[in-house]
Amino acid sequence: MTETLTPSRLWKRMTGDKRLQAARAFWHDEQAADDQLQAVLLIAQQKKFRPKTVVSLEEERKARHLASLPTLPDALAAKALIVYHLAEQRAMMGAFLDSLGIAHENGLIQEDKVTPDPAKVAPAATQLAQQFPAADVSVYLNTLLYQGAETWEALRGLPELQGLTV
């Protein structure tokens, strides 16, 4: 039995470069103000800064500070991972949904309720792993799984979930 990869565990297993990409996307997202405030407080606490100091930092420095934190609360890590995928991994998201026959617009599922054909999930994951780096595929598939465990249940146990570099 493999451990369940929560958003914070996924964050911890991502390479520093990938965490930095995710952190940059997080600070760049205009709809993440509440989460950004939580991140400011976390950075201030972890780095022994005043929150006011963190707020005044340029976006790149805030991103580097956030990326340097080995653990994040699940809600914050989840937001960072979602924003990262929307900003950096649209091609991979679209390729996976195309192979499943799920309608999407640039990687975003258009319907409220989607049920992928369980028989197509494993072959689609294998195909994705042949097209994109294993660590990226692993982060994406694990993100789908924790976001919608019922919808993406067929992902559970696939070898492509394990491709993270520690």
Image (cartoon, rainbow, N blue to C red):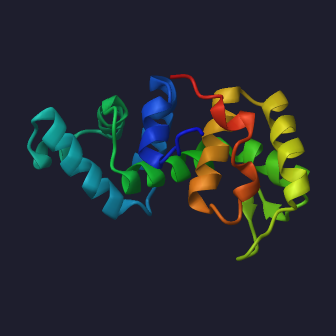
Q: Position of residue 29 (x, y in %)?
A: 46, 54
Q: Residue at x 82, y 63 (%)?
A: 116
Q: Quadrant of residue 138?
A: top right
Q: Nearer the viewer, residue 72 or 25?
A: 72
- Please indicate, yes or no, whether residue 80 appears anywhere in the rendered image: no
Q: Residue at x 51, y 47 (%)?
A: 81
Q: Quadrant of the N terminus?
A: top right
Q: Residue at x 56, y 23 (%)?
A: 165
Asked if residue 161 lies left or right of residue 79, the reply is: right
Q: Residue furthest bottom?
A: 112
Asked if residue 61 lies left or right of residue 91, the reply is: left
How many marks overall?
Answer: 0
- Please indicate, yes or no, whether residue 95 appears anywhere in the rendered image: yes
Determine whether 154 is above or below 17 in the image: below
Q: Residue at x 28, y 49 (%)?
A: 39
Q: Position of residue 11 (x, y in %)?
A: 45, 38
Determine whether 115 is above or below 53 in the image: below
Q: Position of residue 38 (x, y in %)?
A: 26, 55
Q: Nearer the viewer, residue 67 or 75?
A: 75
Determine whether 116 is above or below 133 in the image: below
Asked if residue 118 lies left or right of residue 21, the reply is: right
Q: Quadrant of residue 70?
A: top left
Q: Residue furthest front?
A: 1
Determine whether 35 is above or below 141 in the image: below
